[in-house]
Image (cartoon, rainbow, N blue to C red):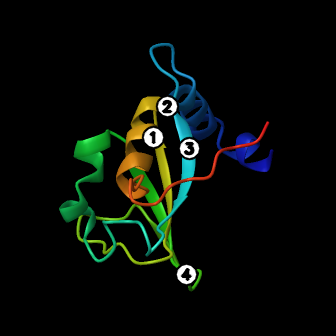
Amino acid sequence: MAAAALRPQVMDFVDGILTGADRELYMEELRLDPDVCPCIGQTLREARLRSQSGALVLAIRRVDGNLIGGPTADTLLMAGDLLICMGTAEQLRLLIQILIPIRSSTPRPPKHT
């Protein structure tokens, strides 16, 4: 509430970007699991997350708690990183497929209803 009162134009921008007339954008947190994520040890440039999915990586929270706001193309992706991302539902779905691929060799148990 205080941020909205002190910076109304910033809040209007964020609100407009997340609920624009032409598309809705969402924010998501994705943890990099060393057992499944193929991008660990790559830079953002090498991982090509933006070009493959269209989603933006806004920030990265390291395991030690360090927050990297506005990571650059040279930022290294590390095991346990929490990526804070923004995109359309489809862009985030694609990003999840890249970062957490489904392995056909590991069967998943059926969900009970």
Task: For mark 2, give the secondary structure.
Answer: helix
Q: Which residue is mark 1?
A: 92
CA distance separating discs 3 and 4: 20 Å
Q: Which residue is mark 2?
A: 89
CA distance separating discs 1 and 4: 22 Å
Inspect the image, locate mark 3, and give the three-letter code of the amino acid beneath it. Answer: Met
N-terminal of the two: label 4 or label 2? 4
Inspect the image, locate mark 4, and give the three-letter code of the amino acid beneath it. Answer: Val
Label 2–label 1 contact, CB within 8 A: yes
The vertical placement of 3 against 82, above or below, is above
Inspect the image, locate mark 1, and give the three-letter code of the amino acid beneath it. Answer: Leu
N-terminal of the two: label 3 or label 2? 3
CA distance separating discs 2 and 1: 5 Å
CA distance separating discs 3 and 2: 9 Å
Label 1–label 4 contact, CB within 8 A: no
Quadrant in which the N terminus appears = top right
Answer few, some or many: residues within 10 Å of disc 4's Cα (few below 14, many 20 plus, some between 14 and 19): few
Task: For mark 3, give the secondary structure.
Answer: strand
Answer few, some or many: residues within 10 Å of disc 2's Cα (few below 14, many 20 plus, some between 14 and 19): some
Q: Which residue is mark 4?
A: 63
Residue reaching furthest left?
A: 46
N-terminal of the two: label 3 or label 4? 3
Q: Which residue is mark 3?
A: 27
Residue ID at (55%, 31%): 18
Q: Nearer the viewer, mark 1 or mark 3?
A: 1
N-terminal of the two: label 1 or label 4? 4
